[in-house]
Image (cartoon, coloured by chain):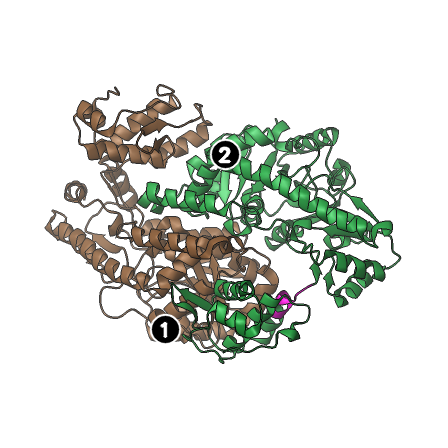
Chain colours: A brown, B green
Amino acid sequence: MLTYDMSNRGRLARYDYLYRCVKEDILRGRLGSGERLPSKRALARHLQVSVVTVENAYAQLEAEGYLHSEERRGYFVSTVEIRTPAPGVAKAEEKEEQQWLLDFRGGGSGTQGFPFSVWAKLMRRVLTQEGTRLLRPVPHSGVPRLREAIARHLYQFRGITAAPEQIVVGAGTEYLYNLLVQLLGRERVYGVEDPGYSKAARIYRLNGAETVPVTVDAQGTPPEEVERARVQVLHISPNHQFPTGAVTPIARRQYLLHWAEKGKGRYMIEDDYDSEFRFTGRPIPALKSIDDGGRVIYMNTFSRSLAPSLRISYMVLPTGLLEEYRNKLGFYSCTVPAIEQDTLASFLEEGYFDAHISRMRVYYRSRRDEVLESVRKSPLAGRCRILGEEAGLHFLLELDTAKGDGELEQLAERKGIRLSFLTQYQLQPGAAPEHTLVVNYPGIDTRNLPQALERLAELL
Amino acid sequence: MLTYDMSNRGRLARYDYLYRCVKEDILRGRLGSGERLPSKRALARHLQVSVVTVENAYAQLEAEGYLHSEERRGYFVSTVEIRTPAPGVAKAEEKEEQQWLLDFRGGGSGTQGFPFSVWAKLMRRVLTQEGTRLLRPVPHSGVPRLREAIARHLYQFRGITAAPEQIVVGAGTEYLYNLLVQLLGRERVYGVEDPGYSKAARIYRLNGAETVPVTVDAQGTPPEEVERARVQVLHISPNHQFPTGAVTPIARRQYLLHWAEKGKGRYMIEDDYDSEFRFTGRPIPALKSIDDGGRVIYMNTFSRSLAPSLRISYMVLPTGLLEEYRNKLGFYSCTVPAIEQDTLASFLEEGYFDAHISRMRVYYRSRRDEVLESVRKSPLAGRCRILGEEAGLHFLLELDTAKGDGELEQLAERKGIRLSFLTQYQLQPGAAPEHTLVVNYPGIDTRNLPQALERLAELL
């Protein structure tokens, strides 16, 4: 029987420690390929842990391919190459695996609350009803039925009138950013929000386009800054700026539209990444909804509102760009499999998406309240200010401290806490204020939160 | 009841004509949203066509989103926007829709023979067994289990020894080409085969990389041409060049490897797009299998051997590139949904892929023989020579004619035949010989073939 000293696990969760022990044994060849593992119940008894602990450990090992299960027979060790990876690779992998008491950088939306059984049901139905039609090539912009469903959704929820022809479905917004540089050209100057979502800037740069930061203020992106920086394509999130949370008011939106219409080939890429989650008042209509001049490329993703592994995003192109898009990029195959597109179309058409979003809004609000409550009850309470909690999947925590962000980050890491500062999202020094934590509350383990906040308060 | 004059259908298949009539009525608003269509049986009786004809027409309309079916209730008109699209768009759409008596450009591998029921069964099982684990983010290079299965497959069938860490899974080779330019840099000179697979060249150019054609000969790409053209990254298909069908012999492979090893930062991208289908002798081992210097990036796709709508391709990176890949591109999310990856992993692990390929080899061989037989029996027989029929999903037909390819193409189009010439794949004039048809035989409608060949013979 596998024997591990569970008291050696330090700060790790029991299941996590067990998972690491078994993985190590597989990677070192102590557990051979095809070997059968003890039953969950037997191992739980042996190690004096709960069955759920063993279950979670096995599930993780199975998900990562170390184990496989056979119905009614149990878990078996999979064939895993026992080798020493290149040193560079190993280092990077280890870094990813570090465990935290609390990780403020943990991904935004998790997969909690996603109605997997509905999704699976619809997918099964699509498999049955569509059958081999699913194997045909998909039109390059996506399955028509899905594009129609998205168009209806945009009209109802974001105030956007778009024909299905304007919608391009792709495997993630990252992929769509790549397409956009190819459509608009890499010789243009791309402006990105500072502080901001760094992947967009990274991808524009990787595509060889000059990418300049535009410092945001409390109202989002100032048009005069855009003008000054000679930006031609502006990537913005006017409805809920990440990470500052700024909402761009209507007057400035109109200024931005004027800016875009004034110059030839000027465009705005509206990244509407978490518009679904607004807890106070009505959702802010998208910039695209008042884009009469056809200067806004709207972009959103289902990976965030549904599940990260789904990889379905889309953009809405202005009609004026359609012909160029078709000529330049129409040869690309659509990157999302037909079955996912059909399933998502049904999910939208039959109201499951709306229901999911409503439910998640309630769920996130209560998660947010729980985290806010913990903060207010913690020793940190008197020494911080909560900002931008009315929308989206993160809020800000302005800390009352003399310590620099870098110092605080290091001190916290030693205490097992990974902090996320506004300054970490800045592209130029000084673009973001110091001492401001970005709290991605859906990713936070609330069980560890009180202890972590206590440790954090001690550090200030 | 819907009434259409089926005798007006010209060269169109009955189902196709019916599909167009109904679609037209929906788009013009003559059939309104929500309206119920006559049952298949009733409409078939009314129009005096077979039930299968109506079935196929409805199926197509449903696949395209014009109709939806409700269990036991029949077909209903979906909500379709009735609008006049921009003229440019409309023109392009119409062009795509043109019907041919015979289309030599028709896609290579179709979806015939794909064991959809097995795939659907595995997918259902994955849904049940993996459950919500499918919603977790996928590692950026792909699901470990799939990468392991691909590594095993490569070892067994292509002679390639690669660790799963070297494998990157992505939504189509087109996507991977984009990644490669970002990895290797757009300031390098990319060499592409001429004549060749034009999408690769197009994508490298769209990425702003200098892309130069290298004229291929009967043995594939001549190393001295590569040297002369100052290529740094060479995109080749040494195992079955498209479209010439050339196989690069071992001596030249070694030359190419020497070429790559001689210069810093030189790489070859081995596009192994249809290596599965070789009808004479054993498969040619991949260039990657003798790449001791780590200069070959191997690439292949499941979209071709399984179904175009699946969008799963992969590449094998040399270990020397792994760290750079991770640093530069490791932030990208994997573009293939977890469920497709898990399903494909099972499909590979449980031997279904091998069985499918064996079956398809037999199927394609018989399709090929059928098309070859038609050619040999046609009036074209004495006036053409068949080339490169021993491998892959296309062969060449050298025509005995004095007419230029452009003229012949136009003449044939007027007779309802869309030809595909070797010269259409050339990037520089003179790179490919004239009068040589590329026959993608899996896409050919053999029922129309004799008539089409007759018409073609008249044109020569």
Q: How far across and down, in percent of the image, does residue A398 sit?
A: 22, 54
Q: How far across and down, in percent of the image, does residue A336 sit?
A: 47, 53
Q: Is residue A282 left or right of residue B333?
A: left
Frontmost residue, B142 versus A33: A33
Say what secondary structure mark 2 lies in: loop
> In which quadrant will I find the C terminus of chain A?
top left
Q: How far across and down, in percent of the image, does residue B91 sit?
A: 62, 72
Residue A312 visible in the picture: no
Q: Residues within 10 Å of mark 1 (few under 14, many from 20)?
A: some
Q: CA distance from mark 1 to mark 2?
A: 50 Å
Q: Which residues are magenta?
A: B94-100
The residue tagged 2 is B351
> In which quadrant will I find the N terminus of chain A?
top left
**Up-down relation of residue B441 to residue A92 (above or below):** below
Q: Are marks 1 and 2 in contact (CB under 8 Å)?
A: no
Front: mark 1 or 2? 2
Frontmost residue, A250 versus B25: B25
Q: Residues within 10 Å of mark 2 (few under 14, many from 20)?
A: few
Chain of the residue on which disc 2 is drawn: B
Residue at 21 percent of width and 60 percent of height: A362
Residue at 60 percent of width and 61 percent of height: A328
Say what secondary structure mark 1 lies in: loop
Callout 2 amino acid: Gly
Callout 1 amino acid: Gly
The residue tagged 1 is A159
Chain of the residue on which disc 1 is drawn: A
Q: How many marks?
A: 2
